[in-house]
Amino acid sequence: MRLLISNDDGIFAPGIRALANTLAEAGHDISVVCPDRERSATGHGLTLHDPIRAEVVESGFHPTVKAWACSGTPSDCVKLGLWALLDSKPDYVLSGINQGSNLGTDVLYSGTVSAAMEGVIEGIPGIAFSLTSFVMRDFAAAAKFAKQLMEQLGENPLPQLMLLNVNVPPVPWEAIAGVAITRQGVRRYFDVFEKRTDPRGKTYYWLTGELQEELEPAPHPFIPPDIETDVQAIRNNYITVTPLQFDLTCAGGIKTLQSWNFKF
């Protein structure tokens, strides 16, 4: 398959090299367009007031991989790849392998998930891969699952346009309990700003929010109650696969709002 791969950890991140090289060795046609430096937690931001530059990268990847380092955000990278750098439309837009989890409501901030979602917005299915650790540097299990997942998709294409958000526990392949199809969980943080003073005596603030709790999400009218959240399943060393979409419309709210009597 033709695959466009991006990330938010930057061109030098070991995760994207593990993903791109593993899939290239499996015979896929790989193009990489990712930020030239770390762009974590940029969400779906775009560069509008500065030029975007892309430089060819000739080392660190499998010989068949075509790679560019881009000065923009993860979403910029995918847009640039689709509209300017690639000769043909890819079958999938992949992102990762991210260093750290993208679980629950964290996906709203994630540059990794946003890069893959950019493909979905353009009508191309996306997959975001994350290793749920900030310290473990072994991406072998996550890359192995990515290879298996692409084989699965080759035989069984997705029934509709969507993004698969994949989180892999930081354990050896033999210790992974299996694959869980999950729903999005809820994570809540202490959004604490630490007040500091720079050498010139001026005040600045550093966001030091820490995870406060992982909440049980509200019942969903279309999802069976026995479907675990990604937050729950990852604790038991399952690889979590959560289907996501960019349509944020609250379907239940439409009927309620239609009953309101607005007067003009």
Image (spheres, rainbow, N blue to C red):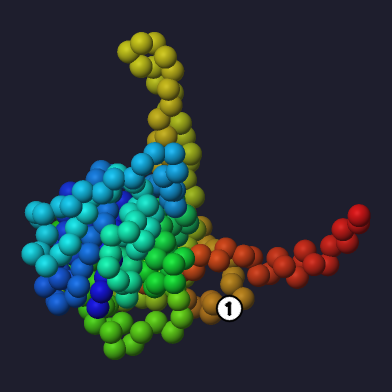
Query: Which quadrant holds residue 7?
Result: bottom left
The residue under the point 24% across, 82% down is: 151
Instruction: Answer above or below: position of 186 versus 228.
Output: above
The residue under the point 36% across, 75% down is: 180
The residue under the point 44% across, 72% down is: 123
- Residue found at the very far right of the displayed protein: 264
Residue 91 lies left or right of residue 185; in this view the side is left
* Residue 183 visible from this viewpoint: yes
Q: Quadrant of the N terminus?
A: bottom left
Which kind of residue does numbered mark 1 sit on? Phe
Residue in front for this viewpoint, 132 or 13:
13
The residue under the point 39% across, 39% down is: 50
* Residue 235 visible from this viewpoint: no
Instruction: Answer above or below: position of 108 versus 149.
Output: above
Instruction: Answer above or below: position of 92 versus 156.
Output: above
Residue in front for this viewpoint, 212 or 98:
98
Q: Quadrant of the C terminus?
A: bottom right
Q: Position of residue 224 (x, y in %)?
A: 53, 79
Secondary-structure class at tag 1: loop
Instruction: Answer above or below: position of 181 versus 45.
Output: below
Residue in front for this viewpoint, 93 or 66:
66
Query: Which quadrant holds residue 48?
Result: top left
- Residue found at the very far top of the displayed protein: 201
Query: Which quadrant holds residue 248?
Result: bottom right
- Residue found at the very far bottom of the displayed protein: 155
Q: Which residue is mark 1?
A: 222
Q: Position of residue 28 (x, y in %)?
A: 19, 75
Q: Position of residue 55 (x, y in %)?
A: 21, 48
Residue 252 lies left or right of residue 246; in this view the side is right
